[in-house]
Amino acid sequence: MKDYRADARFQGIEPFAKKVWLSSPTMHGDEQRWVDEAIQTNWVSTVGANINEVERIVCGKVGRKYAVGLSAGTAALHLAVKLCAERLYGQPKVGHGALEGRKVFCSDMTFDATVNPVAYEGGEAVFVDTERDTWNMDPAALEKAFELYPEVKLIVLAHLYGVPGKMDALRDIARRHGALIVEDAAESFGATYKGIQTGMFGDASVLSFNGNKIVTGSSGGILLTDSEEDANKARKWSTQSREDAPWYQHEELGYNYRMSNIIAGVVRGQLPYLEEHIAQKRAIYERYREGLRDLPVQMNPFDAGNSVPNYWLSCMLIDSDAMCETVRGEKDALYIHEAGKSCPTEILGALTAFNAEGRPIWKPMHMQPIYRMHPFVTVSGSGRARSNAYIQENGAVDVGADLFHRGLCLPSDNKMTAKQQEIVIEIIHRCFE
């Protein structure tokens, strides 16, 4: 491990006395009120006023008709995938997944929780490459995917780091091919595309209240739909699919996925602060953009003409010709520093040495060992990733691998002071010396 604090480039910089986090929970005190009320009234299980209020408020903020509070965003994604799969293919036999033997188009640049539910239901994810304008699913690559696999009827897409994807184009392609969309808005609560909140664009959509999200419950998630039937199904499935009988009666598989009224109390206390958190995150993004403008780097992009992100994480992409020599293995990375150049490994190492948390850009799903042999579709073709190569063996350009190679997530905690951020920016500058 390199001793960055002994490096002459970093002399005069003192480590942060208190860690500067990537994105930690920001509590306001209102959360305690609703948690205490749940405890005092003895409503601590999976029913109660907090859950009802969270569902009502989220519906109002996003614009959907129905919301189902669940234990995690992943649980919500699973039920969203299951709802759409059963609408397309019917209810499976017990012991079989609703997607058994079927392919599903999935975002490639995302956390694996987005795509794992496809595997839960026995399907095979086909990863669709990323476009550079928003780092989300590329509509041109999706069109190519339908040329290669015209039988596919389900798309699972995410809005990366709080930036909306190109939803008009993606939805138009889905409609033309008769496909349904599961929209993973876990990272983008409060972001808008053409004035419409993310969470409104899927046949079923999902929010997350994980501890690092812009609004948190420490855990928890929401499934959003405009179908009362789907909402009722999701509620039933989330409570072990109990039938309306005086005893425990089960006619289909169920899950222990319902949100706790305690968790809902934390979320309820957080929801009034969504816009405040977004404003704080935007200020962080703008300070980075201004403070790093003299370096050969770019901030994570968004379509300013159509989108307003929630700025959940501020990310940075190093220009290709400013990358020092670097290589990544499965769990380790090496680099050789060059004056005027740097790389994510060097910058993240320096931040860690001074008690600040960053993170590499999500490693694309098609590069993950668990999914490496799944199909992967780029604009220019399809293939399977076998290394960090940005040009596939068949000549297809791999945008996701390139972003992973050159990109990193910067400390984006909304409790970070402007002075702390100035020091983070100074550390990044010195990495390029």
Image (cartoon, grey):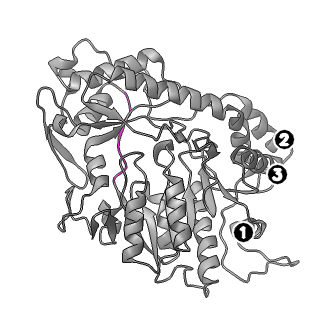
The tag on residue 48 is 3
Residue occupying image coordinates x 67% and y 31%: 273
| Whole-number angstrom distance, CA of label 2 to CA of label 3 | 12 Å
Q: Secondary structure at mark 3?
A: loop
> How would you rate the neighbour count of disc 1 (Cα within 10 Å): few for under 14, some for 14-19, many for 20 or more?
many
| Whole-number angstrom distance, CA of label 1 to CA of label 3 | 21 Å
Residue occupying image coordinates x 40% and y 48%: 135
Farthest residue, direction top:
12
Q: Label 3 amino acid?
A: Gly
- The part of the image, by quadrant, that contains residue 30 is top right
Farthest residue, direction bottom:
93
Where's residue 368, x and y in %? 32, 61
Where's residue 268, x and y in %? 73, 40
Q: Label 1 amino acid?
A: Asp
- The part of the image, by quadrant, that contains residue 384 is bottom left
Region in magenta: 356-363
Where's residue 251, x and y in %? 73, 83
Q: Label 2 amino acid?
A: Gln
- Residue at which label 1 appears: 230
* Upstream in sequence: badge 1 or badge 2: 2
Which of discs 2 and 3 lies nearer the camera? The answer is 3
| Residue 68 sits above or below residue 252 on the image | above
Where's residue 414, x and y in %? 53, 28
- Residue at which label 2 appears: 40
Residue occupying image coordinates x 55% and y 72%: 179
Residue 17 visible in the snapshot: no
| Whole-number angstrom distance, CA of label 1 to CA of label 2 | 33 Å
Whether label 2 touches label 3, CB < 8 Å: no
